[in-house]
Structure formats: structure tokens, C-alpha cells
Amino acid sequence: MTSPARIRLWGMVRKESLQILRDPSSISIAFVLPVVLLFLFGYGVSLDARHIPLGIVIEQPDTATQSLAGAFERSEFFILSKFNAIQPAQRAMDEHKIDAIIWLKNDFSTRILAGNESPMGVLINGVDSNQANITRGYIQGTWLAWLNLYAASHGQALPLPVILQQRVWFNPALSSRLFLVPGLIAIIMTLIGSLLTAMVVAREWERGTMEALMVTPLHKAEILAGKLIPYFVLGMGGMLFSVALAVWQFDVPLRGSFWLLLLSSALFMLVALAIGLLISIVAKNQFVAGQVAIIVTFLPAFILSGFLFDIHSMPGWVQAITHIVPARYFVAILKTLFLAGDVWPVVLTNMGALLIMLLLFTTLVWRKFHKRLE
Amino acid sequence: MADAVLTFSDITKTFRNRRQSVPALEGISFAIQRGHVVGLIGPDGAGKTTLMRLIAGLLLPDTGAIRVLGIDALTEPLAVQSSIGYMPQRFGLYEDLSVQENLDLYADLQGLAISERSARYAELMHMTGLSPFKERLAGRLSGGMKQKLGLACTLVRSPQLLLLDEPTVGVDPVSRRELWEIIYQQVQSAGMSVLISTAYLDEAERCDEVLLLHQGKLLEQGAPANFSHSVAGRTFQVTAQGQGHRGLQKQLSRAPGVLDALIEGEAVRLVMDKPEPPTAAVLLPELPNVYITAVPPRFEDAFVARLKTRRTGEDTALSMTLNVAGDARDEVIRVNKLQRRFGDFIAVNNVSFTVRRGEIFGLLGANGAGKSTTFRMLCGLLPVSSGELAVAGYDLRRAAAAARGRIGYMAQKFSLYGNLSVLQNLRFFSSAYGLQGKQQNDRLNWALSTFELHDFRDINAGDLPLGFKQRLSFATALMHEPEILFLDEPTSGVDPLARREFWARTNDLSEAGVTVLVTTHFMEEANYCDRLVIMAEGEVLAAGTPLAMKNRARTEENPDPTMEDAFIQLIEQAQQKAEVAA
């Protein structure tokens, strides 16, 4: 690189950096938005079933029913309300006061030790099927644990052929925060890389500054690099900031290598920037660029990346679409590095996919961007 | 042509979109010599900006060759860009960067060696008078200062060829004069060649050479004096006792043999089709005491004569049939100590004036003088911070829709629906004012014929040429026959011919009894007004008739001052006062 070229590039980078520093919206997208999103998803949104309102109907109170009710009451998963007949409990369910009912009929204590017939009924509000499944699991678990104890205290072996021993890997506490927070980093970097970049380049078109830039001796590569470098730094800054918050504020473990995390983030950042540039080349005003960036980058990163919704439970054709969402690969890398560690096959495959996307989008940017007005 | 810095050989450029192809330039050939200042003039849409962009390598021609400083602009645009300076119409200043930072950026981009910078900066800052504002953000500079900074950025590495695309549009006369001084300084000290496009014909007169473009064709190239020669013996000044200049102009513009009739103070300036002195009997058979004197030709006369002969068969005379009632001499607009603040910035301060029925009242001033803000308050679009105003007896902020129905407003920016046709726009705006049925159809026909829009009725408003867009805006503002008309910068960016046409219509309206309030940054347009105020930095500097304004500037050295001279003098007086006060 000759010296004038370096001066030109440095001039672009410095100008862009000054503009970022003076524009409150850039800074807030890079640093305030991550905080808001992290706190919202870290504390506000939880996919875990906790404090499920549960009704228990005890038609004939005795020591066995008392002991079972106690087991549910002690569990952190439930908030228990007691009824003495099924009708008021059903009414409570209709009024959304409770999400599930455990119905202990008056012969519960005699049937329980007979072991051949189901001693109780369970009704679960199935509107939210995901939540209903989780609730059923918790009820089953609490019930089996209680039954074990109860049988032992009565000197009887539990009349069950198989006992389920559960062990949850990677996220033993089943805390959704642990997988939401790493995924959020992908969302934040998409915002900075694509949305912010698309808007600032479109702004140059809108304000007529692009025409003045184009007639300077700036080479096409210098214009592009001058735009990429500051936003790359900004995006990586936002990423490091989010990682620090994740690890120290939300106690998300970082089990994999930090350097691998940095490398894969840099790769993803470049993909996001290339998409942002491509959008701004096609859409030359801020409003359109912003809308396009949200629809083609932010929303897919949110919905189709596996950040919030499991890709494997999507219909086949939607799963196919997720393959063109770069955030999908990065979310997979993030979740692996944070929760599982350096699982090389996973990390390398996904990085490979990102690399292909990077080549694709930079080629498109290179071919679409001209130092001409048409 | 050994020493040509720029040559065009048979350049053709056509813009194509899905529906149509629009020829922008056809068979253009010319050469510009080193060290010359060349003016590029022509009506809107003549292809001036396209020509500039072709030189700068921002567009590629369909056919032909362009050589800039001996470099082929088609194959080596980067080399061209490294040796020229180009200031686009909207120069790319970064408003969130300071003056110094903008300069640094362009010094970096133009590859100015670090060692040369401090000397060059000092020179540019001195020339532009921007030294005290180095740390100020470019967005907070006045319009004139922004243009000067833009020019400084373009000149940072003394280019061999300087391209300026309408650098003085909307700039106040003082800054305009300073911009020209800078340009000439560069030509003399650095041997720079300049190509400058402009809408001000007095600027074209200052060039060594002029290129006249019209509808994509190069009509003429030559020294401005040669242009003026073509109308030698054809220019006259006419006055008539007992006849107002406006009525006089109207009669004269229809008289036989008259190409152009322009109000100039109390007199009317004529350009005739033949170099023969006209007689009062032919021009104004019904008037006694008509005085006709021959005057030396100006560049503008030649420009208009040249283009008017090309626009044959276009009769701009029109019949305004407006039903306006009310006594003349009523004060229909009263403004008293009007103030408008935006945060701690005072956009309009202590503005007072009155307008009588049927008057054409002008608000003159550069961009940012507070004209549009005053207008918006009058129209009830913006609340006042303090002071009083009444339009037709109402404060339009609080007035009922009925009161609003009595005014018409033509916004500065084209505010019609670009993707609706001419007819659909007219229909929509007339129904917005409650017109329907036969009444609406009558008005639609009136608008289409009065503004000669019949041929364009089904074309989308966004695809119209600029002059026609302006006509359409004007027509929509008149659909409901308002008695008071607000025209905000109606002639901004419009070429001299379309401006003449516009003022002819406005004169007719005024004669029909419509009160017209108009803002403009073209100083000479003050001549069309009955009375006016001159505004600068939110305040009224002077108020009165155009003649009274010019009388103030009349001196021994300058016995026949223009409105621009008067304006510059007012500004200088105001600055002196401010300095004395400080």
C-alpha cells in the first residue's frame, strides 16, 4: 500500500469514527441496546416453567394426601392452591387462576398402596402446548419422588418396572437464560453490522456526501474498507461488552476458548457488515435501508437462527430457509462455545458456512458497488 | 487545441428506465482552454449536471470521447478524479464534523502532503473568512459559509480543473460575491481552469466564455460579449406616464415584435425581434406620453432572445378568472413583533409588516434569513413564540377551516404526489378544499388550460420537468380561488424563462385582486413586488417599495444601483451597527 492510499483510508476511518462518536444513535445501538436486550432476555423473558399455579383437589384429607400436597408445596416449580371438590378447581382453571389440577379422589390412600390402578387424575391447560409438556414433566417428577419416599416409609418396594433417572447436560439448572444470553450476542452484532451500517451508508447518499466522496481519488476498496473498519471495531466492542455482561452479570459459563469465540465473532461480523453494505448500495435512502435491514437480517436472526426457537422443531421448509440465515451458524457456535466447550466439529462446520457466506456477500458488494452514479 | 484542458467529442448520453429513454445530451462537442473561466448556462433540465458528472467520471456516455487534462475520462476515471476538483450541487459536507475536520478529511482524500497542509489551510481560511469558525460544526454554518467551506474543501489540493455545479444557488449576495472572488483568485494565482454552471445570468457575464445548453444540445459557445452582440440595437427601456409598470409590462409583452418585456424598477425593459427602434404608436397605441430609450444589451437579453425564439408558439398570456370580493386597500395581513424561537436559536425576531389587498408583497433574503419560518407562522403551520398576526382577520392557528379555505399555499419543496397523474393531483387537492361536481370540473378545466397542462394530464407529477412541476403546484394552490396566496420560494431552481412565465401569472392574479405574499432569494425579483421587506438572520433590515430600497443605495459612483447592491449595502450597514454595539 502506497502512502497516499494509507492517508486516504485513514482519513475515511477517522471521519467515520468521529461521526459514530457524535451520533447518539450509533452509540446507543452499540452499547445501550445490548444492555437493554441482555437485561430483558436475561431477567425478563424466561422460557422455564417456574411458579406454575397448580390446584390440588383433596376429597378426603388424610396423612397420605397431606404428605403429597406438602411435596408439591415445597417444590419451587409450583404455587399450590387447595380445593375440596373438582368443580371449584375447574372453575379456577377456566378463570386462568391455575394451569393444572391434581385430583385426589376420596379413595386415594387405599388405591395408592394397591398399586394396580391409577390413584389420581391430572388435568393440564393445554393451550400453550410447550408449557403443558413442561408442567406435565414437573408433576410427574414430583409425584415419582414422593411415591418413592412414601413407599419406602411404608416398607414397600415401589411397584414400578422402570425408574427414570434424569440428567441434564450443559444446562443442568435448565435455565433458559444460559442459552438465551449467548444467542443474544448474535442479535446485537446483526444490529450493529447490518442495520447500522446500511443506515449510515444510505445517509451518505441521502445527504449528497457520497457524490463528493466519489470524485475524490478514493479507490473503491478504500471507500468500502473505510466504512467496514470503524463499524467492525464498533461491532466487536459491542460483542466484547455483551460477553462481559453475560459472564459476569448473568453467570453464563464460557466453557470454550475465548480466542475461538473472538475469531468466530469476527467472521460473523464481516458477514453482517457485507450484508449491511449490500443493502445500502441497493436502497439509497435511510428509511428503505432500515426497513430492508430489519426484514432480511434482524427478524430472521431473531426467529430463524435457533436463538429463541429450536430449529429442529420447525417444519422442514422453514428449516431449509434457516440455512441462508447467517445468524443461525453463529448462534450454534455461540451456544456451543459458551455451554459445551470447544466442540471442534460443530464450531468448524459452522465457521465454514459463515466463510462461504462471507465470500458470497463480499463478491456481491464488490460487483454492485461502482464509483459511478448509475 | 494543444492547450485544451477539457475536450468533448460528440458526446451523447441517454437515461433509460423501464418505460422510456430520456436523451440528456446529444452530440456535444467543445473544448475549454487552460486558465479560462467558462460558464455553463441553460434552462433546467438542459443537461448541465449530467455534463459535469460525465467529466468527473461519475457517468459514462453512450457515445463519444471525453479528455480531461489529456486523460481519457472513460477509461481512467480515477486518474481524472485525482487531478480535478468537483463541487456537486449539494456539496458533501459532513454536518456533524467541524470546519477543520471537514477540511482534514478532504485533504486526506485528495492526498495533500502533511507538510503542505498548514500553509494551504491558512490560505483557504483567509480566503473564505472561516478562520474564526474552525471548531464549529459544518451543520451550524450559514448557507453562504457552507458553500465557502465546500469550495475550500474542493480547492484543498489546488486542482488543475475546477468543476462547480451551481455553487451560488440560494446563497446571499454577499457570499456570492465572495465566492466569485475566491474563484478568480485561484485562476490568477494557480492558473486553474474553471467550468461553472449557474442560474444567475449576471454571473455568466463575468466568465471568459459561456456554453449555452438547451434540451441537451449545445446551442452556442463564445464570449459573453458576443452573446450580447446578437441583440445589439434591439434593447430598449420604456416608461409611460400615468401607467403602472405592471400594466405596462403586460401590454408590452403582447405588443408586436416584442420578444421579452421585463419590469425594471418603474420602467419596462424590452428585447425586440429586429434591430429597429420601436415606435410608441406600434407598441402602445392607446397611451400618450410614452418614452422609449435605447439601452445597451445585457447577457440576459441575449439569453432570453435566444431561447424565446426557440420556444415558438408558446403563448404565456392567460386569463385568470377569479372571483375575489372585498375593498382594495384593506389591510389583509397584519404582522406585529413576530418572534419564533427554536430552543435558544431565534429564527424570526421582531418582524412587523402589513399587506394590503391586491398587493404583491415580497420577503427577500438569503437561505436561512427566516423567510420560510415567517411564512409557516402566517399560514398557521407553526405556532408563534410571541407577537401577533392576523390573516384576513384570523389567526390561522386557531381559525376554522373556512378561514383556511380563503388562502392558498405553495410550499417551497414540490409537495404533490409524484406517483399520481397531473389530473389526479388536481382532483385530489380540489376535493380537499371541498370542490365537487360541476364546480370541480370547471376548475379542473380552468387549471389545465390556464397552466397549459392539457398535454400532460395523464403523466405522473413526479415525471414532469421542473418548470411544469412548478406550474402544477401553482395550479393546485389556486383551485379553490383563494383571496390570499402564499408562495414560498416559487422560483428557486427555476430557469429565467420559467421565472418570467411565473411572474406573468402572478401579475395577472394581483390584477384580479388576489393578495400575493412571495418569498425569494433572487434579488432582482423584488422589482415585481409592490412592496417588500428585506430579511437577514431573522430580522427585517428594511421595508418599502423596490424603488425606495434602491434609492437608498444610490450614490455618486453607483447612480443606477440594482436591488442586489441595495441588499449588500443593507447587510454591511447592519454589520457595522452590530460591531458598534459590540
Image (cartoon, grey):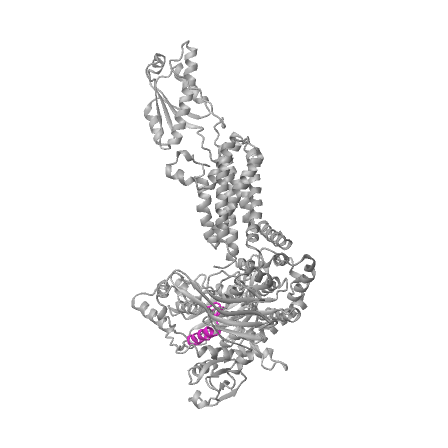
Q: Quadrant of the N terminus of chain B?
A: bottom right
- Where is residue B173? Give x, y as percent: 58, 71
Residue A257 vertical position relative to residue A59 in the rendered view, above or below: below
Q: Quadrant of the C terminus of chain B?
A: bottom right
Q: Is residue B71 above or below residue A134?
A: below
Q: Is residue B561 above or below residue A10?
A: below
- Residue B340 lies in what quarter of the image? bottom right
Q: B528 or A12: nearer the eye?
A: A12
Q: How many discs mark residues in the rendered view?
A: 0
Q: Please indicate whether residue B528 sits to the left or right of residue A320 in the image.
A: right
Image coordinates for residue A210, horizontal then vertical, percent? 53, 57
- In this view, the residue farthest toward the top is A155
Q: Is residue B505 magenta?
A: yes
Give the residues drawn in magenta, as a range: B487-510
- In the image, residue B475 lies in the stretch drawn in magenta: no
**What is the x, y in percent for residue A316?**
37, 37
Query: Looking at the picture, how far across and down is residue B157, in whole percent?
Result: 63, 62
Return the residue nearer the eye: B378 or A126.
Answer: A126
Give left or right: position of A370 versus A141: right
A208 on left or right of B481: right
**Can residue B332 be seen in the rendering of this structure?**
no
* Residue appearing at x 46%, y 89% in the figure: B280
| Left or right: where A352 falls relative to B156 | left
Give the main secondary structure, helix, strand or loop, of the magenta stretch: helix
